[in-house]
Image: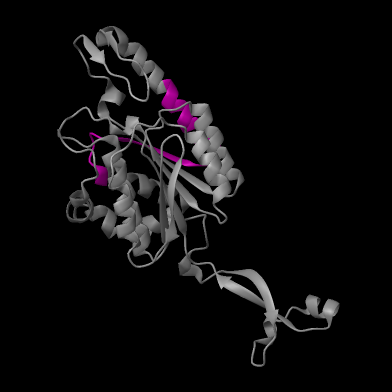
Amino acid sequence: MQSNQLRTDLITPALLAGLGTLELRARTLVEGLVSGMHRSPYRGFSVEFTEHRKYSQGDDLKHLDWKVFARNDKYYVKQYEQETNLRMLLVLDASESMNYRSEPKGLSKYQYASVMAAALAHLVLDQADAVGLMLFDDRPGRLVRASNRHGQYRALIQEMDRAPGSGKTRIRHVLDALAELLPQRHLVVLLSDLLDDPEDVLRGLRHLKHRRHEPLILQVLDHAEIEFPFTERSRFVGLEGIAPIVADPRALRARYLEEMKRYTDRLRRGCHDLRADYGRFDTHNPLDAGLSAFLAARAGRAA
């Protein structure tokens, strides 16, 4: 049996070397990815007021706060902080259902999502922006805060390099906690199969939006979950506490596909209403083409 751990050899030598289109267009794609989080660095640096300090000889007089002087008869200078870096947080589903893979030699949903997260982290760090990570199941995991420090990429890979546990998926609970935990605006990239109540997922995303974060949703599903290609009477083993059942898949396929379409359509419409980008990924498809197309489309919408 193959390990469900992240194959780190897929990240740099194989995946990143194979992301030719993505790497060649990295500047354009990442500029689109970060759109809306801060002003474009190509238009000059923006600054944000943070606090006052007492005037010292040699300070630029244009930064004197004359309103404070009028009240206190003392000179204070406004201090500013450059606001040039994106803060992106990768929120990666490590619940039991992410272990699933229909092809023994293929990637599990967790592995596929992890490689996707690693590629995004690589692109963002290459732009000198900050990226962090949090794994979750029914509760938030350890938060690796967004940073662009040396060694951050390795720290993220080490955090992802683990197999999902036996926890269930509770996305709203996690997003609600995260919305209150992050003091600054983040681009929150949710990577999950989203096998949860879609209304709860959308409520969690709405909470993030309310706290001024920008959610980006990347749903990762196994090819068999999308197509339901089973033809013989089978025993389906449930994940996350669902009991196994024996059934004839040919009698279930039409209804299954109808329910799956209704479910994904609700997520897509809900994300559209929230102005949150949503993409669905099939583990059967090459990741480089899918991720490149998604980021290119997002960059086009932001232009």
Residue 281 painted magenta: yes
- Percent x, y of residue 8: 22, 50
Residue 244 vs residue 48: left or right?
A: left
- Percent x, y of residue 160: 31, 48
Residue 270 painted magenta: yes
Magenta residues span 262-288
Question: Which image quarter: residue 237?
Answer: top left
Question: Which image quarter: residue 99?
Answer: top left
- Percent x, y of residue 246: 27, 9
Q: Is residue 101 above or below residue 71?
A: above
Residue 194 vs residue 17: left or right?
A: right
Residue at point 24%, 42% (across, down): 5
Residue at point 52%, 33% (across, down): 202
Residue 41 vs residue 22: left or right?
A: right
Q: Which residue occupies the foreground of this view, 66 or 192?
A: 192
As drawn, the residue found furthest toward the bottom would be: 57
Which quadrant holds the N terminus? Answer: top left
Question: Which image quarter: residue 149?
Answer: bottom left
Is residue 107 in view? yes
